[in-house]
Image: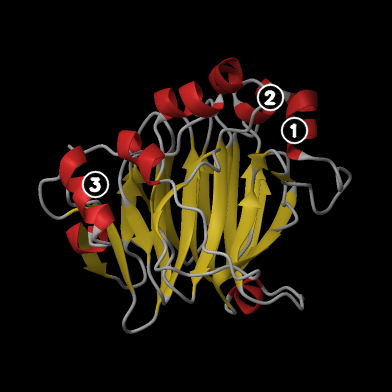
Amino acid sequence: MYKFVPILKSVLWGGEKLIAYKEIVSDRTQIGESWELSGVAGSESVVAEGPDAGLSLSGLLARDGADLLGKSNYARFGNEFPLLVKFIDAKQDLSIQVHPNDALAWQRHRAKGKNEMWYVIGADPSAHLRCGFSERMTPETYEDCVARHALIDRLSDYAIRPGDVFFLPAGCVHTICAGSFIAEIQQTSDITYRIYDYDRRDARGDLRELHTDLAKDAIDYTSRSDHRISYERRTDASVELVRGPYFTTAFAEITQSYRFDLVALDSFLIVVCTAGRGELIDDAGNRCPLHQGETVLVPAKIRSLRVEPVEPMTLLTSCIDG
């Protein structure tokens, strides 16, 4: 089992919640993102502790291959880790943006597209998220809205509270708004087409670059309007949130000893602790303490995982098994 050094990203819209939430020490400010598990070039995760401390995620993959990813995933992805996990703290609204699908991302950038999901950890009283069109759109109406800075008025607007879940397929126009604190699980991709940024300027006083033309062809104009995922929380049980070819994610609220049976799973398992603390114990007896704000990568070769909470824990688990 592996923990990684968090990659903290100071950004224009970032807040001050992540340091305390993750229980780490840093003098960084305006931290909008903590990349927990990343194979993105230039922002690659490094093992934080244990005998493999300092080894990169790609180094682990090169050494362990299918034992880490699972046989089918290793055949599919090779030495590229397929998922990226982040915590996001939005003190200001993020830009209105969209991500390309696999085909377009490969055509333009020789990269993967970006399907993603959000799990709301915390929300200020006025916090909300915007994603998907609230009414019919076409490339022509998109151009008109961009010209009038009116695209935001065409997005579905959701007031949020902790525990809310959203799935955003590639091509879905969206923005994370001020006061939102979320966990994001996505394909390994850092391709974002920024459509509107409220005329904000960067640290040098320059307007941030927009990609309205690139976005036009990336938008899925037929995307469904409601991207919220409904689920029923159950104590000491794993509840599936999202299942698809890009990732399968479940939620678990653990109050007592709980076992994940991984025998039939030909995949790594990512465990994200969104609240509480406890310990993970694998089938070989290896132990890994885990608390709020931490993420653990469990190799595919592990056949079972036991969670021993010290206090009630909420976990997100994610894998690729389809």
Could you tell me if residue 221 is visible in this image?
yes
Residue plotted at (64% across, 20% down): 78
Q: Earlier in the sequence, mark 2 or mark 3?
A: 2
Q: Is residue 28 above or below residue 46?
A: below
Alpha-carbon distance for marks 3 and 1? 41 Å
| Left or right of residue 277, residue 185 in this image | left
Residue under label 1: 58
Determine whether label 1 and label 2 are within 8 Å by CB: yes
Could you tell me which secondary element the residue under label 1 belongs to?
A: helix
Residue under label 3: 143
Q: How is the image coloured?
A: secondary structure
Q: How many marks?
A: 3
Q: Quadrant of the C terminus?
A: top left
Residue plotted at (71% across, 23% down): 65
Say what amino acid the circle numbered 2 marks.
Asn
* Residue 71, x across and y down, in percent: 59, 18
Binning the other alpha carbons within 10 Å of mark 1 as few (below 14), some (14 to 19) or many (20 upward) gives: many
Could you tell me which secondary element the residue under label 3 belongs to?
A: helix
* Closest to the observer, 305 or 105: 105
Alpha-carbon distance for marks 2 and 3? 40 Å
Find the residue positioned furthest to the left.
136
* Closest to the observer, 203 or 173: 203
Residue under label 2: 79
